[in-house]
Amino acid sequence: MSCDPDVYHPLAEEYQKEMSKAKHPAKMWVAFPEFPFDAPNPIEISHYVKQAEKELAEAGFTGSVQLMAGHSLGGVMAQKYATKNADKIQGLMLMGSVLERGNHKINDDGTTHFKFNVPTLTMGGSKDGLMRITRVAESWYHQVENIEEA
């Protein structure tokens, strides 16, 4: 929230550069939906994502694989959008954000069962004190360490 989308351009450019050197190189197109006052919200997210998709198509994007990323509050909005649009969002990247607690439940045997339907990479860390490392550790525990056996 209140973060200019331009600050993410270097990250996207670095990712594009590394993807071109990968074992199976891929071209990556990036769109940065812009929200009024740089504040993503669940009511407007579909509109701004569709607008970004339109701009990508106008720029020549013809692919079908879509990944979504979000930072902080944007990560919360991104996971809500991705869940409702799992047919087109194949992956989610959370930065300074974690999957919400409502996406899992604790089984009778104490293990964690996830209801989240989009593969997700979480990058945790904090410099602003909003996403505490203890919350990131809790999320890791339920996503990796304590997960029920398939």
Image: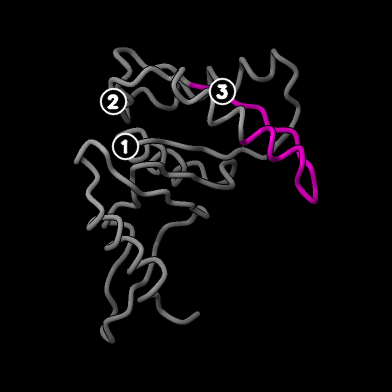
Residue 48 percent coordinates (x, y): 45, 20
Measure the alpha-carbon separation of dots 3 and 2. 17 Å
User: Within 10 angstroms of label 3, few (less than 14), some, or many (20 or more) residues?
Assistant: some
Q: Quadrant of residue 4?
A: top left
Of the numbered discs 1 and 2, the one sitting upstream in the chain is 2
> Where does the N terminus fall, quadrant-wise?
top left
Secondary structure under badge 3? Answer: loop
Residue 107 percent coordinates (x, y): 29, 79
Of the numbered discs 3 and 2, the one sitting upstream in the chain is 2
Is 20 magenta? The answer is yes
Three-letter amino acid code of the residue under disc 3:
Ala
Residue 53 percent coordinates (x, y): 59, 23
Is 146 magenta? The answer is no
What's drawn in magenta, residue-wise? 15-32
Three-letter amino acid code of the residue under disc 2:
Met
The residue lying at 48 percent from left, 52 percent from top is 121
Three-letter amino acid code of the residue under disc 1:
Ser
Work out whether 35 lies above or below 90: above
Of the numbered discs 3 and 1, the one sitting upstream in the chain is 3
Question: What's the mark number on residue 31?
Answer: 3
Question: What residue is pinned by disc 1?
Answer: 72
Question: What residue is pinned by disc 2?
Answer: 1
Left or right: residue 99 compared with residue 88: left
The residue lying at 40 percent from left, 26 percent from top is 45
Magenta residues, dominant SS class: loop
Left or right: residue 24 compared with residue 115: right
User: Within 10 angstroms of label 2, few (less than 14), some, or many (20 or more) residues?
Assistant: some
